[in-house]
Amino acid sequence: MLSFFNPLRIRGGVHPEAHKTATANLPIVTDFPLPKKLYIPLQQHVGKPAEPLIRVGDKVLKGQLLAYSQGMISAPVHAPSSGTILDVNDYPAPHPSALPIRMIVLETDGQDTWMLAPTVNDPFQLTPEDISLRVGAAGIVGLGGATFPTAVKLNMGREAHIDLLIINGSECEPYLSCDDRQMQERAEHIIDGVRIMLHSMTTTNAVVAIEDNKPLAFLAMQKAAQSFAAITVMQIPTRYPMGWDRQLIKYLTGKEVPVGSRSSEIGVTIHNVSTALAVHKAIRYGQPLVSRVVTVSGGAILRPLNIEVPLGTLIAELFTFCEVKTDAVARIIMGGPMMGDALPHVNLPTVKATSGVLALTQSELKNTEEHPCIRCASCISVCPAGLRPLDMANNIRMNQLDAAVDIGLKDCISCGCCSYICPSNIPLVQYFKYAAGEVAARQQAQHKSEQTKRLIDARAARFKRIADQQAAEEQVRLAAKAARSHQLTTDSDTSTILGSRLAQQSEVDAH
Amino acid sequence: MYVLAAIVSLTLLGLLLGFLLGLAGKYLKVESSPLLDAIEALLPGSQCGQCGFIGCKPAAEALANGNAPATICPPGGSALAEQLALLLGLDLDLSDVKEPELLVARVSEATCTGCTRCFKVCPTDAIVGAPKQIHAVVADACIGCKKCIDVCPTECLQMHAIEVTLRNWRWTKPVTAKAEVNTMGEALC
C-alpha cells in the first residue's frame, strides 16, 4: 500500500525468465576466427545510409573508412578487418523481411592489420566539439539497439545544457549478457568513456544504472568509478523493460518525459554502456566502431557465449562457432526475445545493432494458440507506457486506426509486455506493430496525394503557359502577315508578289 | 487580299466567340455547393476514372448526393475513405475493405519506340522521355491511372506491383482467431 505513494514507483513491466546464466559467467571470446568474407551494410543506423567511397578491388586496412556519412543524421562505415573489396551490391538485410540492402563485401586477408591512427593521451585537452566530431567520424551509434548516431546526441546534449547523463547498463532483455560481461571485464574503459562523454556534453553528473541481477558488474563498475565523484553507479530493480529510457529516467530522477518530446528537454540524456566503451576506444586509440560484443544464446545453442565479432560477420558463422543444433531451432532472433526481430535465415550479417543472436527451441517460444479476450486487464497493468492494449487491439482489429491513435498507439514502444502476459495469447504487440506501420503508410499515402495534386496543378499551369505563348506568337505572326499583305497590295511588281508568295508558302510549310 | 480577309474574319470570329464564352462563363455559372468543393479538394483530382465516373468532379457529385460509398476512390485508399466518411458523416466499416493493390507503370525498354504518346497523357508528368528516346516512369510520381497503357502503340507499358523495399515494408495484420475459423470452415466446405 505504501508503495502506491512512493515517487519512484515503476509503472508496468514484467519478470520474464532471465536465461542469462548460460553466458553471463563466461568471459567474452576475443579470438573468434576471422571470417573469410564480411558483409557490411551501408545503413546500420537511424538516418541516411552511408555513401561508399571505395571501389571493387581496392585493398583496405582495418578501420579504414569505407563509406562516409551523408547529411545531419547518419554515420560512416569502416572496414572491420583488412582485405580486398569484392563487391558493393544488394544483399539480404538482417531484418524480418530479409529484403536486400546495399552492402560492401570485404574479403579478409587474415592479417587483420590496423590502419595507423594517432592516439590521444589526454582527451580532456580536446574541445567538446572536437570529441563529438571524432565520435561521429568513428561511426559510433547507440549500441543498445536504437542505433541513433552518438555524435548527434552528444551535440544535442551540449546544446540543451543537460545536467544528467544516464548510462544504461540495465540490459533488461532476457538471454542477453553482452553489457553485463563488458561491465565486468572492461569497467575502467567504460568509465573512461563516460568521462569523455561528460566532457563532450559539458555535463558534470553521470549515473550508471545497473539492474540488481548483475551484482558482479555492479561491483566492478563501482570500483572503477570510485575515484570519480562525477560518476555514481546505482543498482535498479530487475524488471523488464527497465532499460526503456523513459522508465529509467522516471525511476532515477522522478521526472517524466512529456509525450512527444525528447529526454533532453528535461535535462537528461541516456547512452548505453557499450556506446561508452566505443567512445573510449575511438577517442583514446582512434579506433572506429568495427566490432561489437554479441551474445549468442538460446536453447538450440550448445556452447552459448559472448563473442567480440567484426561487424559484417554472418550469423551462420556465429552459430557454427557456438555449435547450433540445427534441427532444434524453431526461431532465430536478432536482439532480445522481447523486442528483437525474428530472422528468416542465418545468412545475414551482424550489424552495429546486433546485441545478441538467439536460436530458440519450440519449448522456449510462447504458446500461440489464441483465445478470445477475457478482459482481465493484465495487459493494462503491465504496460509501461500506461496504455490500454486490449482496447487498442480491438480498434485495430476493426481497422479503426484513428481510434487506436487517439488512445495512444503512438506511445506504444512495442516492448511486448502485453503479449507476454496475455493469458489468451492474443498477439497484442503484433497488432500495434502492424498498426504503427499502417499509420506510417497512410501518412505516406497522404503525402503522395498532396504531391500528386501539386504535380497536376503544375502540369495544368504549364499547359496554360504554353497555350498562352502559342496564342501570343500566333498574334505576332498574324500581325506581321497582315502588314506584309498590305504592302503587297500597294506593290505593282508581280515578280515580287510571286517571290513573296513563295516565301510565304515556305513559311507556312515550315510551320 | 483573300489571305487578309480570311485572317480578319477568323480573328473576328474567334474574338466574338471568346467574348460570348466569357459572358456565358460569368452569367450562366452554375453555383457549386461548398460541400462539393470540399469533397473535390479531398479527391486526388487526377481524373483517372478508376471509380467508374469520368472524373473526380462527377464522383464528388455522386458522393455529395449519397449515390456513392465513401470507399469509392481506389487511389485514395482507406485513408481517403475515412476522411470522406468524416466529412459526410457516414458510418464507415473498413473491416471488409481490401486495400487496393497499388500498381505503377513501368516501361519495357525492349519495345519502347519513343513515340512520346504516353508522357503526353500522363496527368502527373510521371513519364520522362523525348522523341525516339526510351521513356521511363518515375515510380514515386505514378498514380497508377493506366492512361499511358491505353495510348501505348507497342504495349510496352505494363502495370507492376510497387516494389517492396525496406523503406515501405510493413508488418502484416495478425490473423485473428475468427478469421482462422473462417478459413477452416471454407476448407471443410
Image (cartoon, coloured by chain):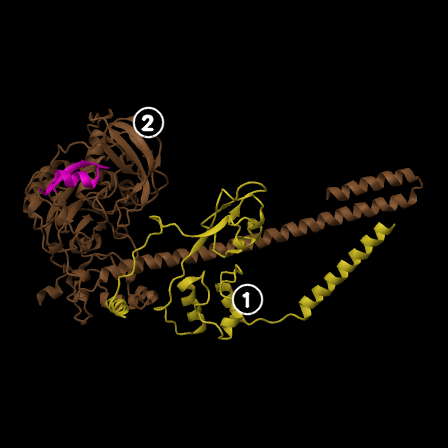
Chain colours: A brown, B yellow
- Secondary structure found at label 1: helix
Q: Is residue A440 above or below residue B20?
A: above
Residue nearest the observer in this picture, A222 or B175: B175
Residue nearest the observer in this picture, A64 or B65: B65
Which residue was labeled with disc 2?
A57
Q: Is residue B133 above or below residue A362?
A: above
Chain letter for mark 1 = B
Residue nearest the observer in this picture, A236 or A445: A445
Q: Is residue A462 above or below residue A310?
A: below
Q: Is residue A240 left or right of residue B167?
A: left
Percent across and percent down for residue A405 are 31, 64
Q: Residue at x 29, y 34 (%)?
A: A105
Q: Residue at x 25, y 50 (%)?
A: A267
Percent across and percent down for residue A144 are 20, 46
Residue B154 seen: yes
Q: Is residue A319 magenta?
A: yes
Percent across and percent down for residue A268 are 23, 49
Question: Residue B57 shows which numbered tag?
Answer: 1
Residue A209 seen: no
Q: Please provide the residue range marked out in magenta.
A: A303-323
